[in-house]
């Protein structure tokens, strides 16, 4: 029996799509909040293999999702490269910044990141032993552009202004930073696969702010390079690419990058994606995470509309972005029932 997620990613059209949720291990779950309190803080949780495996398993036990996603964060890569990283409660991440060739030169080479990241590989090893037989294990990394936006600004930004300014004013330094993150990501994801990840996902959360040639150079090209390198080493491991808010640039993204599946955010219509994107292969998505807060008949109607719109081809049901801390855990059960009865 092949796992449902792997069948969809291999291009099979299924009568019921596999289901998982971005941020499925998170603050909306009381059991997550308890384990996080036990760990002390978010980064301590990421670097504690037993507790990180425990929070990864919590939503699997509660809901029986078809996939578990490694509990970690996209910002562990900058930290492994030598940036300082901390999280301010209620505000988000803070990092030491990289804005010049001199800052870049101080970072660690991409092949020396494992000392810091070893606990992440250990989390995957635990999970590949402990997950139910039918549950697929997903590893992940941030895509270079999204990771670079945090490294340049030193924090999350609404419009990714600092990264755009460095890109426009000193393209050479910015390109060198992207190249460095790209190489580190290839190394990191290869190690995740060797530790037990059966699928990997590239999160390009800020891809939507890149236009024209910038999208080609900093969203498309790095994804293509990462996927080509992974396919060379691990040809059987499927890759999900998530160029969030790429809009029209979702068209052809899978073909241009070699991704096995493109994850759709909730700003695109599933009916449009069926015609424009799913013609090239598997798509993932794309319920608005707001429904997990509001619930009710709208949640059921929207989950079923998306399931039916994408039923004609390979589809992985998911939200269009992460579930939020104010979501009602019971709405997750309602969503799963709605998808399976659509
Ligand atoms: O999906 C999953 O459950 C797997 C684990 C995961 C986390 N972050 C855990 C997390 C994944 C895949 C990520 C990806 C991530 N991290 C992205 C890309 C996806 C996206 O959401 O757009 C980004 C941009 C980050 C960076 C990041 N991490 C920010 C901006 C924040 C703070 C915002 C917030 O929600 O508090 C985080 C923290 C974070 N990462 C949490 C979790 C569960 C919340 C931490 C906590 O427990 O307080």
Image (cartoon, grey):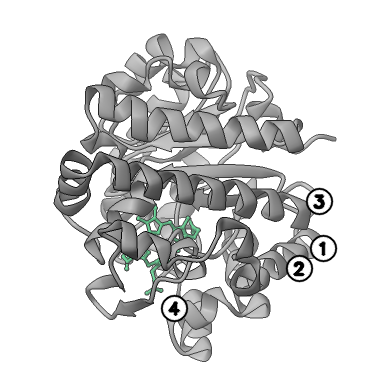
Question: Which residue is rendered at x = 30% and y = 35% of the image?
Answer: 266
Q: Label 3: which residue? A: 133
Task: Name the N-terminal-most of marks 2 and 4.
Answer: 4
Q: Does the closest atom of ligand 1 sit within 8 Å of the Cβ of label 2? A: no
Proximity of marks 1 and 3: CB atoms separated by less than 8 Å: no
Q: Label 2: which residue? A: 126
Please state which of the two labelled residues, at mark 4 or mark 1, is closer to the viewer: 4
Label 3 secondary element? loop
Badge 4: how crowded within 10 Å, few (<14), some, or many (20+)?
A: some
In the rendered view, does 33 fall on the left or right side of 205?
A: right
Please state which of the two labelled residues, at mark 3 or mark 4, is closer to the viewer: 4
Q: Does the closest atom of ligand 1 sit within 8 Å of the Cβ of label 4? A: yes
Proximity of marks 1 and 2: CB atoms separated by less than 8 Å: yes
Q: Outermost residue, right direction?
A: 1
Mark 1 and mark 3: Cα distance apart in space: 9 Å
Proximity of marks 3 and 4: CB atoms separated by less than 8 Å: no
Depth check, front residue: 87 or 165: 165
Task: Name the N-terminal-most of marks 4 and 1.
Answer: 4
Vertical side of 214 occupied by 96: above or below: below
Vertical side of 293 occupied by 38: above or below: below
Depth check, front residue: 260 or 137: 260
Q: Label 4: which residue? A: 42
- The quadrant in which residue 320 appears is top left
In the rendered view, does 12 fall on the left or right side of 242?
A: right
Mark 3 and mark 4: Cα distance apart in space: 29 Å
């Amino acid at each position: 029996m092949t796992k449902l997620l792997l069948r969809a990613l291999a291009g099979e059209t299924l009568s019921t799509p596999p289901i998982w949720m971005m941020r499925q291990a998170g603050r909306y779950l009381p059991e997550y909040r308890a384990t996080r309190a036990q760990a002390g803080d978010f980064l301590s949780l990421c670097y504690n293999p037993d507790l990180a495996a425990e929070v990864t398993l919590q939503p699997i036990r509660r809901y029986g999702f078809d996939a578990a996603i490694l509990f970690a964060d996209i910002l562990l890569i900058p930290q492994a490269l030598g940036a300082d990283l901390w999280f301010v409660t209620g505000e988000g991440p803070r990092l030491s910044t990289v804005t010049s060739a001199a800052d870049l030169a101080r970072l660690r080479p991409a092949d020396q990141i494992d000392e810091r990241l070893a606990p992440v590989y250990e989390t995957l090893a635990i999970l590949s032993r402990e997950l139910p037989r039918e549950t697929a294990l997903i590893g992940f990394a941030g895509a270079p552009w999204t990771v670079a936006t945090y490294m340049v600004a030193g924090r999350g930004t609404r419009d990714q202004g600092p990264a755009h300014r460095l890109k426009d004013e000193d393209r050479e330094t910015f390109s060198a930073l992207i190249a460095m993150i790209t190489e580190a990501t290839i190394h990191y994801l290869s190690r995740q696969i060797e530790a037990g990840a059966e699928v990997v996902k590239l999160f390009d959360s800020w891809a939507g702010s890149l236009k024209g040639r910038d999208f080609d150079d900093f969203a498309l090209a790095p994804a293509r390079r990462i996927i080509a390198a992974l396919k060379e080493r691990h040809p059987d491991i499927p890759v999900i690419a998530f160029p969030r808010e790429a809009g029209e640039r979702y068209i052809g993204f899978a073909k241009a990058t070699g991704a096995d599946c493109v994850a759709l955010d909730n700003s695109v219509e599933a009916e449009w994606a069926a015609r424009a994107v799913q013609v090239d292969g598997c798509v993932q998505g794309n319920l608005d995470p707001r429904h997990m807060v509001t619930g009710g008949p709208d949640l059921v109607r929207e989950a079923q509309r998306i399931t039916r719109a994408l039923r004609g081809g390979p589809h992985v049901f998911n939200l269009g972005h992460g579930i939020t801390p104010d979501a009602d855990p019971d709405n997750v059960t309602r969503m799963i029932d709605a998808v399976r009865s659509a």
